[in-house]
Image (spheres, grey):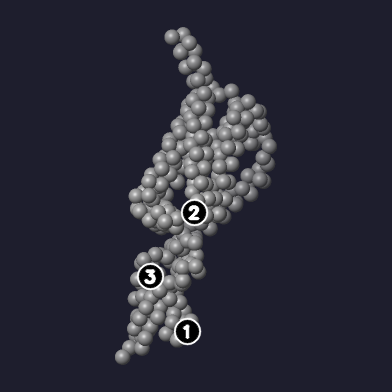
Amino acid sequence: MAGVCFLATMDTAPSSAPSSTRWIQEGILAYWTLFWLLNVCDKLIGGAHFMWVGRDRFAQFQKYFASVGLDAPWVADAGLVVAAALEVFALVFCAGAWLHFRKSRPALTRTWFFVGVLLTLGTFTFFSVGDHWFGDRFELLEHTLFWFIAAVSWSVFVRLEHVALPTVPQRIPGGAVAVGAALLLATSTSIFRHNAQGFVQRTEPLEAEQVGDHLYKVSFPFLGGSTVFEETLRQFKATHPDESIDHIYTVPKPLRLKKADALIFYISTDDKP
C-alpha cells in the first residue's frame, strides 16, 4: 500500500520539465489532439459546408478498391472501419495525454502520448501500404511525411522534459510578436474573405463556353456540386432557347483530373425543330 501511495504521489507531482518548455510540450499534444479530432470529423461530415470542406471517404475508398478489382461495397466499408478505428483511438490517447499533462501527471502523460504516437505511426503505415497498393504517390508522400513528424514529435517531447530553454518574453523581441500578429490577422482576414466570396460558387450557375458547332464546355469551380450543375443547365436552357440538349458528357476518363473538383463536362445540342 505504501508503494502504491508513493507511485501515486510521484505521478501527481509537478513535471520536472522547466516551465519555459512546457508550452512547447503542450503545443505538441494540442497539435496531435486537434489533428485527429479534425480527421475524425472529416469521416463524419461529408461534402462542403460553411468553413468546412469535407470529402466522401467511402466513395474515395470504394474508388481505390475498385481500381484493383475489389468492387464489393463491404471491402470499402471494412477499410474505412479500420482507418476510422485507428484514428479514433489515436485521438483518445492524444487527448488523454493532453488532459494528464494539464493536471501535472508526467508519467501518465508520457504513457498515454506514447500509445497515441504508436497508433499514429500505425495509422500512417496502414495508409502508406494502401497508397503503394493503389499507386497514389501524392497520398504516399503526405502520409510518409506525417509518419516522420509523429516520430519527431515524440522525440522532441521526451527530450524537453529535462531541458531548460529561455522563456518567450526573454528571447522574442516585441517587433517579432507584432509581425506575427499582423500575419495572423492578414491570414485570417483572407480566409474569411475567400469563404464569403467563394462559397457562393456552390449555388451560382456557370457560363457555358462554346468550343464548337453545337458544343459547349463547362468547367466546375472548386466547391461546385449538384446544385451548380442543375442551375447551370437551367441557365443554359434559358440563354439558348433555339437549341435543345442532346447529350451531356464528361471528358474521357484518362483526361479527368484526380479529384472531383474542377470537373469538366460538355453539352451537345441540336437545333429545335
N-terminal-most mark, 1 or 3: 1
Q: Above or below — where is 25 with respect to 229?
A: above
- Residue carrying label 1: 212
User: Label 1 crowding class (10 Å Cα cut-off): few <14, some 14-19, many 20+?
Assistant: few
Label 1 vs label 2, nearer the camera: 2
Circle 2 SS class: helix
**CA gap, disc 3 and disc 2:** 30 Å
- Residue carrying label 2: 134
Q: In which quarter of the image is residue 84?
A: top left
The disc label shown at residue 229, or none: 3
Q: Which residue is drawn at 46% across and 71% down?
A: 252
Residue 27 in the image: x percent, y percent? 55, 37
N-terminal-most mark, 3 or 2: 2
Q: Above or below — where is 233 with respect to 87?
A: below
Q: What residue type is labelled 2?
A: Phe
In the image: residue 101, left or right of residue 47: right
